[in-house]
Image: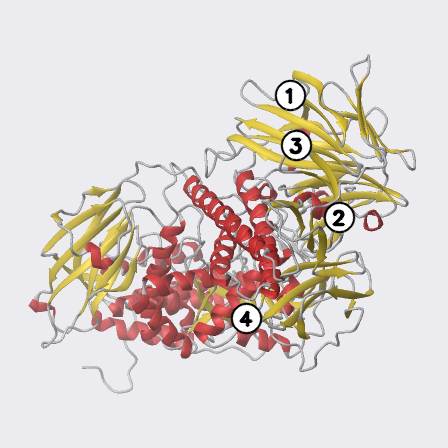
Amino acid sequence: MEQPGRQPFIHPAACLVQKNRRATLERVEKFISDQYFTDCNLRGKLFGETSPLDAISYYLTEKRIPYGDAVKQAFQKTEVGKTFGPTWWTCWFKVELTIPKGWLGKEVHLIWESDGEGMVWKDGEPVQGLTKEGQKTSYVLTRELKEQDPQGFLFYIEMACNGLFGAGQGSMIAPVDPRKTFTLQKAELAVFRRDVQELLLDFEVIYDMAKLLGEDNQRSFQALYVANQMVNLCDVNDPSTFLAVRKLSSAFFNQKNGDSQHVIHAMGHCHIDSAWLWPYEETIRKCARSWVTVIELMSNYPDFTFTCSQAQQLEWVKTYYPGLYSRIKECAKRGQFIPVGGTWVEMDGNLPSGEAMVRQFLLGQHFFLKEFGKLCVEFWLPDTFGYSAQLPQIMNGCGIKRFLTQKLSWNLVNAFPHHTLHWKGIDGSQVLAHFPPGDSYGMMGRVEEILKTVRNHKDKGRINSSVFLFGFGDGGGGPTEQMLGRLHRMKDVDGLPKVHLSSPDQFFSVVETDTSQLCTWVGELFLELHNGTYTTQAQIKKGNRKGEQLLRDVEILSSFALALNSIFTYPAAKLQHLWRLLLLNQFHDVLPGSCIEQVVEDALRYYNEIQSEGDVLLKESIEALMKPNSASQHPTDQAVTVINTLPWERTELISFPDQTLGLVTVSSMGYTVLPERICPRDTVTVLQQENGLIVMDNGILRAIIDPTGRLTSLKLLDSNRESIPENSYGNQFVIFDDIPLYWDAWDVMDYHLETRRPITNIVCKTEISVSGGLRGAVTFSLQISETSSIVQEIGLDAHCPYIRFNTKVLWQEAHKFLKVEFPAAVHSPNATYEIQFGHLQRPTHRNTSWDWARYEVWAHRWMDISEHGFGVAVLNDCKYGCSTLGNVLSLSLLRAPKSPDAAADIGPHEFSYALMPHAGSFQEAGVIQRAYGFCNPLIVTSLAAGQAHSWSAFTVLSPAVILETVKQAENQPDALVLRLYESYGSTVDTWLQMSLPVKEVSMCDLLERPCSSETLPVEEKGIRLSFTPFKVLTILMVLKR
């Protein structure tokens, strides 16, 4: 027995051991390793006794069937080691088990390891997600087995025959292997040693601090010595030693931080791509697997908070997993499950139209308000490939002043200079933006990530807080208990920043207390990577543009019918359904084209539904609008009516039902019945010269076209101004090698420009196909390669200021990039590109690395290069990728990546573009209006209507202001919503004239909430409106019914 006052004996060797840093670090590492010495280290003791399951049986199905159907099927016996598949099938397992009686008082887990993603079902409800890739391979049967507890269980496990990241053949982004099989590797009962897990987490954090704080940090050495002593004290076979070990670690963790330490706001997150390397249908199950695990964690960790975006995904869970959805709503009430983002999906940030972006928020925010009782106040878009300069205004209009992303950390050329900043849009609207400095939304809760967050923060000194998003993401998975355990230990420990389990609102509220030192970024947030996504999957891009335009037309004409036809019912539910499909396809891996073939097929099927159902709605709205409402009208049989959905009068060439051409004038946002055929001042002439060149002339333009379809000259006749520089060719098709570093469907690298090759191999040289009059045209065809070709018609219409190129391409290439170039006889340091509700300029030079990184950019319907008094614009009907280098305008047409879809863009394509030289500025020349008309042709219909007459619903007196949208109000069926924007970049006062029966008019925001209680006066000239540059205004117009 030890005598009082005497020190315990310490062998001299223990004092003399010199602590070699590397050896000591590795000693601790091996003590907790899951690869080395697991027969005698602490990690090997995480699970104790094991017991086999009573029985496992399975049912394999090609379909994703609900639980109720699955349990009725005939199951067959199986065992560990068997494989199941193929890819995208589902295997349901019936699991029968009995916990051994000798395990009383112990925590018991069901261990389940398989290659596929699994979900445990108990009593008809999902209770746990299982995925090896997401470090979730066990389900807790009981935390402490009691005498009275049931010991026999029956579970069902639904295993998807795909992994967390789909089923790529050989690599993550490779095309899907359709014959892949998935193995059940382990299925057993095991005693879980929670005391061992707690010790392991202590060791992990202290070891990481010792390793990562650095040799010049005394706290690093303190951590090293503490960890080493913990190993000395810990006998892995004697749990009674664990208490002394934990006292050491607790003493270390209890050494607190100072008040000046950086504060990290940690939030659970689970980024789930609505479709990517898996189809939409699998995403529904990914949401359930991920979120049910989150909900279970919340029941054991009341301080755990989790952020969740994308209303569409919550809608899916509400529909297919109502029990889980009820639990989610309960956790949301407690403030643990936090809806964020405000949009229907996390959409692409570049390519959707302005109105589509508004609808993302409108549908999303209405869903969040209805389901969770409040609007989102943060826009959450962490993984999108760039951010439009019009987003701040759209956010502000939807009740959002805060923005979070991390994607700019992927910049290939320039490191973005800020992590917390003000972001200002093209209209001057501003939001508070934060980019988590850890440069990820899938943190693991490690010391290394915590330190990187502080070290990497570019606004240190201006702000002392950061967001830290933890949890497996992209393919789902979410946070784990181990992540929470590590973060709890780092809450307030000397040597590390403070870590708080927090929420977006708590973080932004702290920042908002003083933003005076923050910098401001003006304009687009351009991602210097993934700029191939502006072009990849051309059919998806075309479906998006055509769908946006069709739904716009349907809403406008349905609104007019609602106002004028008392028996017409506005198709609100059908339109909402079609909008939801369109918005879903704008997800940031679908519209960009960076998805597998099955997702492309789903997307194109949705576009076909939008087109077919939209055409029906369009026809019904036209029929209701044209229906006579007065006995004084005398219907005529099959009267030709031409409809214009754009807010200005248009004089254009149309094809009548008898296939004849006619030049007609149609009222602004209205129609003309039995339009008069106008005789143009100049008709079109098409002449072939002896040298093989063809000259086309319509009195506005004169084009000279060579045998390969290239423009050698394009003159604006009024000013005799040449558009094509000497010794240059317009409409020059060029092809490039397109082999990126890794991200095949995503990236086009700058070095592709070094491989430019003009396409000049003639199949059929240019020949006259329409000889003139109201229209002239020539056709030609070129050979791209042995298997790919181009057929093009170049057309010029009477009274038209642009020359049109209707193009058909048979595309059978691999890793090639097709563009068309238009050198312009213009000198300017900047080119202008249309974006949502406006435009912006980008440099045509490459002075700086920021300029050069924009070698491939995006635009919507037009781009323009102008000098004072003259310019040249390129219009398009379904393309987005483009560039301007020097004086050469390039429109990107087709790519041919092979991953993740080996068939991307292979097949036939049809598209059109146009070249429009102009005097004066592009604003004065009407480029914006012509681009609208190019994409929105006049609608010609043969319906019984009244006598020859014209009718206009709306006219805006200033050409700078565009009436973009007319729709029924979301929550007021007797009211219309009008959305207008200033398109020139000017301050303007104007009048909105109207002929609809209006009761009252007021201003509202983009969510259709009144801006004030005051109404706008309706005067004889209409409604007076004031705009600043690129301002978007929304009007609520109550109808007289």
Q: Position of residue 728 (x, y in %)?
A: 80, 26
Q: Position of residue 333 (x, y in %)?
A: 41, 78
Image mark for residue 650: 2
For disc 1, the marked residue is 781
Q: Nearer the viewer, residue 210 or 130?
A: 130
Can you see residue 553?
Answer: yes
Label 3 CA crowd tier, 10 Å (few <14, some 14–19, many 20+):
some
Q: What SS does tag 1 mark?
A: strand
What whole-number distance in Å separates the C-alpha atoms at marks 3 and 2? Answer: 22 Å
Q: Nearer the viewer, residue 195 or 62?
A: 62
Amino acid beneath label 4:
Pro
Name the residue located 56 percent from the left edge and 36 percent from the top edge: 740
Q: Is residue 960 above or below residue 304?
A: above
- Which of the marked residues, 3 or 2, is nearer the chain's N terminus? 2
Amino acid beneath label 2:
Arg
* Nearest-to-viewer mark from 1 and 4: 4
- Residue lying furthest left in this view? 101
**Would you say 650 lies left or right of 813 here?**
right
Label 4 CA crowd tier, 10 Å (few <14, some 14–19, many 20+):
some
Q: Is residue 75 above or below residue 196?
A: above
Image mark for residue 973: 4
- Residue lying furthest top in this view? 690
- Which of the marked residues, 4 or 2, is nearer the chain's N terminus? 2
Quadrant location of the N terminus in the rendered image: bottom left
- Which of the marked residues, 2 or 1, is nearer the chain's N terminus? 2
Amino acid beneath label 1:
Ser
Q: Position of residue 652 (x, y in %)?
A: 74, 42
What whole-number distance in Å separates the C-alpha atoms at marks 4 and 2? Answer: 31 Å
Q: Nearer the viewer, residue 502 or 922?
A: 922
Name the residue located 25 percent from the left edge and 54 percent from the top edge: 158
For disc 3, the marked residue is 806
Label 1 CA crowd tier, 10 Å (few <14, some 14–19, many 20+):
many
